[in-house]
Amino acid sequence: MTDVLIAHHGYCFDGACSAALFTRFLRETQPGLGDARVEYRGLLYDPGAPPPGERLEKGRLNAILDYRYSTSELLTWYFDHHVSAFQEPGSEAHFRADTTGRKHHDGAYGSCTKLLADLGRERFGWTAPDLDELVRWADIIDAARFPDVETANSFEHPAMAVSAVIQEQGDDALLGQLIPLLGTEPLEALARGPLVAPRLKPIVARHAALTERMARAGEQRGDVALFDLTEHPLDTVGKFVSYALFPTAQYSVVLSRTPRRVKLSVGFNPWSRHPRRHNIAALCERYGGGGHPVVGAVSLPPQELPRGKAILAEVVEALNAAP
Ligand SMILES: [Mn+2]
């Protein structure tokens, strides 16, 4: 029996949903894989993270989902939608030269999960209607297509609860249990179940504390809401708190740190009434980061905090300047 290794963007809802959908796809379309053993491995954008090809394994069927491309000959399946997917020299040419039909990238997609669902149907005639709700929410969450800022900051919907737990508590042990369930159980049951509900409570409390902390630290400069939260390490993530606090800001820039890294998060306000003037992925790439046109990040080693502060100032200035 072939062992399958699915290396996915860790630890986020889209990465996990991509892995769940792809597992179903493999089992239901690939001969001999109906009951294959599948291992899940989260790939992080941390500074010093090894190239994804080094996380693949000989003797297995390897897939990379929702993460950077690799020219490794061990890679069999690939799906991604990050416009910064081709970082290794020569990787884009390698991808374009592929003739297997198993490697796919489309930077126009809001989520890798939706890309997988669409290509599964169009290219392979495969559908999983019971996962429509999962695909819909992966696309809402990853592309920040929330109807309003309140929904974006709420944990009420089961998808938002599961997403928060994956983001805050995600590791390979938890996702090894969670991903197979994401592909087979309704989101509602999963959110109420023992893997999610007990882990959500402290997250909700930390989110409330973060909102207060950001209200104290934040300021709006021109079109940009900016936050330097590096005084204490960050213990939670609140991607949309900035827009609840500064609804007229078109962009937000948050500098934060954990013991592992300093991170600058840059985003376009999804509820802004003004058109976006900057490609945030390109802006972050100037500093070794990346992402999507609407949201991106730069990660630095923890000792480079002063450089992080300098980049924060430069990015705020760039976002306020004419493109
Ligand atoms: Mn994604």
Image (cartoon, rainbow, N blue to C red):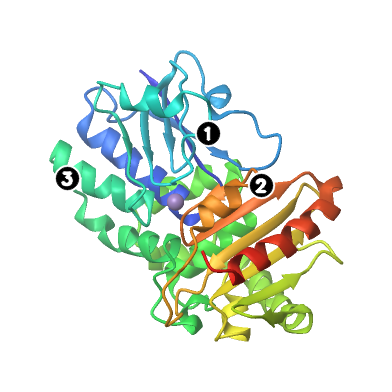
Disc 2 target residue: 287
Mark 3 residue crowding within 10 angstroms, few (<14) / some (14–19) / many (20+): few
Identify the image quadrant of residue 198: bottom right
Point 76% across, 49% down: residue:
261
Mark 1 residue crowding within 10 angstroms, few (<14) / some (14–19) / many (20+): some
Can you give x and y, in whole percent of width and height, for residue 215 in the image? Answer: 72, 84
CA distance for labels 1 and 2 = 13 Å
Q: Is residue 314 left or right of residue 252?
A: right
CA distance for labels 3 and 1 = 29 Å
Can you give x and y, in whole percent of width and height, for residue 30 in the image? Answer: 23, 28
Disc 1 target residue: 87
The kind of residue tagged 3 is: Arg
Point 66% across, 34% down: residue:
49
Q: In the depicted view, which residue is nearer to us: 284 or 271?
A: 284
The tag earlier along the polypeptide, 3 or 1, is 1
The kind of residue tagged 1 is: Gln
Q: In the depicted view, which residue is nearer to us: 294 or 277?
A: 277
The tag earlier along the polypeptide, 1 or 2, is 1
Disc 3 target residue: 121
Mark 2 residue crowding within 10 angstroms, few (<14) / some (14–19) / many (20+): some
Identify the image quadrant of residue 166: bottom right
Identify the image quadrant of residue 229: bottom right
